[in-house]
Image (tube, helix red, strand yellow):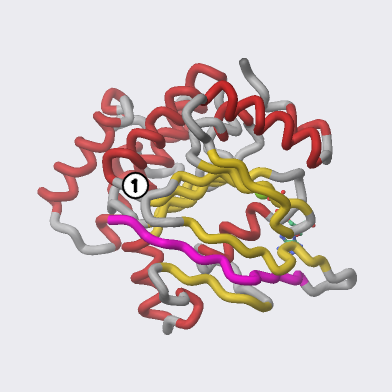
Amino acid sequence: MAARLEVNQLTKIYEGRVARKALDHLHFTVEEGEFVGVMGPSGSGKTTLLNVIATIDEPTAGIIRLNGKDPHSLNKEEMALFRRRELGFVFQQFNLLDTLTVEENVALPLLLDSVNAKETNRRVQAVLQKLGIADCSQQFPYELSGGQMQRTAIARAIIHRPSLLLADEPTGNLDSKSAGDVMALLRDMNEQDRSTLLMVTHDAVAASYCSRVIFVRDGKFYNEIYRGDSRQRFFQSIIDMMSLLGGDARDLSGVRL
Ligand SMILES: Nc1ncnc2c1ncn2[C@@H]1O[C@H](COP(=O)(O)OP(=O)(O)O)[C@@H](O)[C@H]1O
Ligand SMILES: [Mg+2]
């Protein structure tokens, strides 16, 4: 199952003593089954964008459409169902529950959706296998390495086969080997299940696994690059665009060759 995502003139202003325009008429479309990266300097609105798509945050103006439907127009119950069934979200800080084992964390979306125990167990074991963390199924988050936590967070985000997977810097806390593994996994998932993926990243190597990268600056669409047939050339174009885009030094901290 895949989703088509339209982000239409999306604007988000955080009111406060000083109002902040986090998104400014941001406009782009992600086709069904695409794997799109989002890059931009810190503070350019990337996390806000994911939160608004996920209905965690409300837009100030503009509209999101998922398969033609605005998730923000749903009532409370429908919105809960949308989050639970259509959406997978890999958070920057994992958001694993400390008192639950890996297996229990991953099972959570199915439990919330009243899938029966046998089916839950079957699917949890399958996804743990696929992600190479079956051996830690009984461990608690504090017993895991960064890479294992990240895989657990991904397992939980994909267990219910979401039509749209959102990921906020899924390789941000990983060494380059684990980062490569996680990216290969997301790419395979995107190719095999044709799920639509939108991934925020600072890492040009991670971005080079995408089929397209969208660059944002100050909450606005800045540019986009399609992959073409050479990942190496794509990587180089991403690096070039990042230096054009400017921003803080951290933007290049993720570069690994
Ligand atoms: N909850 C919030 N309240 C007020 N301002 C916020 C909030 N979340 C983000 N911002 C501001 O919105 C802008 C975009 O933030 P964010 O989406 O986190 O950027 P990025 O993920 O690209 O680093 C920043 O100026 C940030 O300070
Ligand atoms: Mg962010």
Query: Is residue 7 rendered to the left or right of residue 44?
Result: left
Instruction: Provide residue 178's location: percent of width, then percent of height.
Output: 48, 22
The residue that appears at 73% across and 31% down in the rendered structure is 240
Tell me the magenta residue range: 1-14
Query: Is residue 229 rendered to the left or right of residue 252?
Result: left
Is residue 5 one of those drawn in magenta?
Answer: yes
Question: In this view of the protein, which residue sits in the foreground, 202 or 223?
Answer: 223
* Res 165 visible: yes
Ligand 1 shown in quarter:
bottom right
* Res 92 visible: no
Query: Is residue 69 rendered to the left or right of residue 52?
Result: left
User: Main structural element of the magenta stretch: helix, strand or loop?
Assistant: strand
> In terms of image quadrants, where is residue 250?
top right
- Residue farthest to the right, as pictured: 18
The residue that appears at 73% across and 26% down in the rendered structure is 253
Identify which amino acid the numbered label 1 is placed on: Ile
Residue for badge 1: 158
Query: Is residue 151 rendered to the left or right of residue 218?
Result: left
Question: In this view of the protein, which residue sits in the foreground, 187 or 157?
Answer: 187
Pointer 1: residues within 10 angstroms few (<14), some, or many (20+)? many
Question: In this view of the protein, which residue sits in the foreground, 186 or 245?
Answer: 245
- Residue farthest to the front, as pictured: 229
Question: In this view of the protein, which residue sits in the foreground, 18 or 2?
Answer: 2
Measured along the vertical axis of the image, is residue 136 above or below residue 23? above
Position of the C terminus by quadrant: top right
> In terms of image quadrants, where is residue 136?
top left
Instruction: Provide residue 185's location: percent of width, then percent of height.
Output: 38, 31
Is residue 241 one of those drawn in magenta?
Answer: no
Q: Does the residue labelled 1 lie within 8 Å of ligand 2?
A: no
- Residue farthest to the left, as pictured: 118
Instruction: Provide residue 106's location: percent of width, then percent of height.
Output: 32, 44
The residue that appears at 53% across and 64% down in the rendered structure is 53
